[in-house]
Amino acid sequence: MRLFDIKLSSKTINQITRYLITGFTAFGIEYSLYVLLYKAVGLNYILASVIVYALVFLFSFFVNRKWSFQSQGRVNRQLFLYLLLFLFNLVFANVFLLRFLTDVLGINALFSPFLKMACVVCWNFFIYKFIIYKE
């Protein structure tokens, strides 16, 4: 039994396309606010990343639910699962992965969020499609 059985039907391609559009929009909002807090306000890059990540939470949930995956599932259940994934991403991606990219690999703190988000985008699609917004 395979956990993720992806068929590249037109529906899946549409979901991927809408998911990516939603993600780029959310990332644009997130990165703009990150630069504002990091450079203009002078917050630590980790704190700035965590704050803006939290602000984009509801935007991403509802746009992905209604538009990207056109889900009719129970919103409370989906929101709870989305919150669990959000918390995982908040800790793992924004603290450990971002710190690894910036402090260990020496990638500039203004560029490392791009790499962090590339990782998050990949694993989130599968979790959204097959767990959170599963039909």
Image: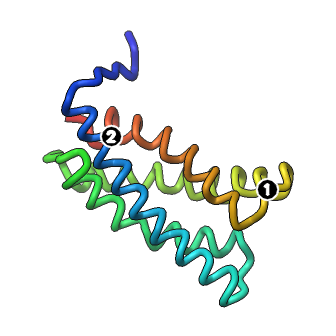
Q: Which of the 4 image quarters holds residue 76?
A: bottom left
Dot 1: few (<14), some (14–19), or many (≥20) neighbours within 10 Å?
Answer: some
Q: Residue furthest bottom?
A: 41
The residue singled out by tag 1 in the image is 107
Residue 61, percent from left and from top: 33, 58
Residue 58, percent from left and from top: 35, 67
Disc ID at residue 73:
none
Which quarter shows the C terminus?
A: top left
Depth order, front residue of 6/78: 6
Q: Residue at x 34, y 67 (%)?
A: 59
Amino acid of disc 1: Ile
What secondary structure is marked by label 1? loop
Residue 94, percent from left and from top: 64, 59
Q: Residue at x 20, y 30 (%)?
A: 10
Dot 2: few (<14), some (14–19), or many (≥20) neighbours within 10 Å?
Answer: some
Disc ID at residue 16:
2
Q: Residue at x 40, y 40 (%)?
A: 125
Image vertical order of residue 94 relative to residue 122, above or below: below
Depth order, front residue of 3/35: 35
Q: Which of the 4 image quarters holds residue 41?
A: bottom right
Amino acid of disc 2: Ile
Question: Are the residues flagged by discs 1 and 2 in contact, CB closer than 8 Å?
Answer: no
2 horizontally vs 42: left or right: left
Earlier in the chain: of badge 1 and badge 2, it is 2
Q: Which of the 4 image quarters holds residue 133?
A: top left
What secondary structure is marked by label 2? helix
75 horizontally vs 26: left or right: left
Residue 2, percent from left and from top: 39, 14
Depth order, front residue of 124/113: 113
